[in-house]
Image (cartoon, rainbow, N blue to C red):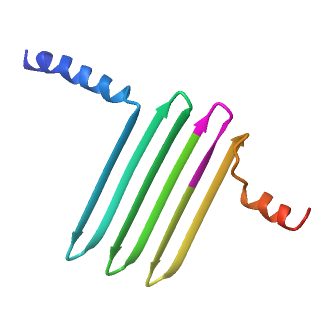
Amino acid sequence: MVAGALALPLTVGAAGIASADGYSHQEISAGADGAATHSVSANADEQGSSFHESATSANRDGVATEHTKANADRDGGDFEHQRGSAGEDGVRNEHTKANTGNSSDEGVLSGVIGGLGL
């Protein structure tokens, strides 16, 4: 009986969250062992949709950061992901980017080719 009474409000609440036009969340923590941040946001409207997520952490072993963003509209979309870290084992950096349609972003390869006049 209790499970049935909770099912309706939980279902209605979940439907309200799923239909939201925007969402954001931020979290920051710090202590003796290090510090970290995390943020997420997503938006959708008649013009398109977007998603952004960032995380950064630091402790005695090193530092790390990660960032992801994606955007889409009726003309196309773009995606970008960056990750970097530094610690005892050295430094690492990764960057991935993709786009479709009539996106105004220029990819790395096309920027190099254009800069060379090719």
Question: Which residue appears farthest toward the left when viewing the image?
Answer: 2
Q: Whole-percent x and y of residue 40?
A: 39, 49
- Position of 101 relative to 57 (above/below): above
Q: Is residue 74 magenta?
A: yes
Residue 22 against residue 11 in the figure, above or below: below
The quadrant holding residue 37 is: bottom left
Residue at the outermost right position: 118
Q: Quadrant of the C terminus?
A: bottom right
Q: Is residue 78 left or right of residue 116?
A: left
Tell me: 17 left or right of 64.
left
Question: At 56% from the left edge and 31% from the top edge, which residue is drawn?
Answer: 47
Expressed as whole percent of the image width and height from the top left, the position of residue 16 reads 30, 25
Q: What is the count of numbered marks?
A: 0
Instruction: Say if 118 sits above or below 91 in the image.
Output: above
* Residue 58 percent across, percent down from the top left: 35, 74
Q: Residue at x 14, y 21 (%)?
A: 6
Of residue 100 and residue 94, the one placed in the foreground of this image is 100
Within the magenta stretch, is there residue 27?
no
* Residue at 53%, 27% in the rendered image: 46
Quadrant including the N terminus: top left
Residue at 43% in and 70% down = 64
What span is colored magenta in the figure? 72-80
Q: For the stretch drawn in magenta, what is the main secondary structure?
A: strand
Question: Is residue 41 shown left or right of residue 102?
Answer: left
- Against 26, residue 113 (above or below) is below
**Where is residue 102 shown, x and y percent of the image?**
73, 40
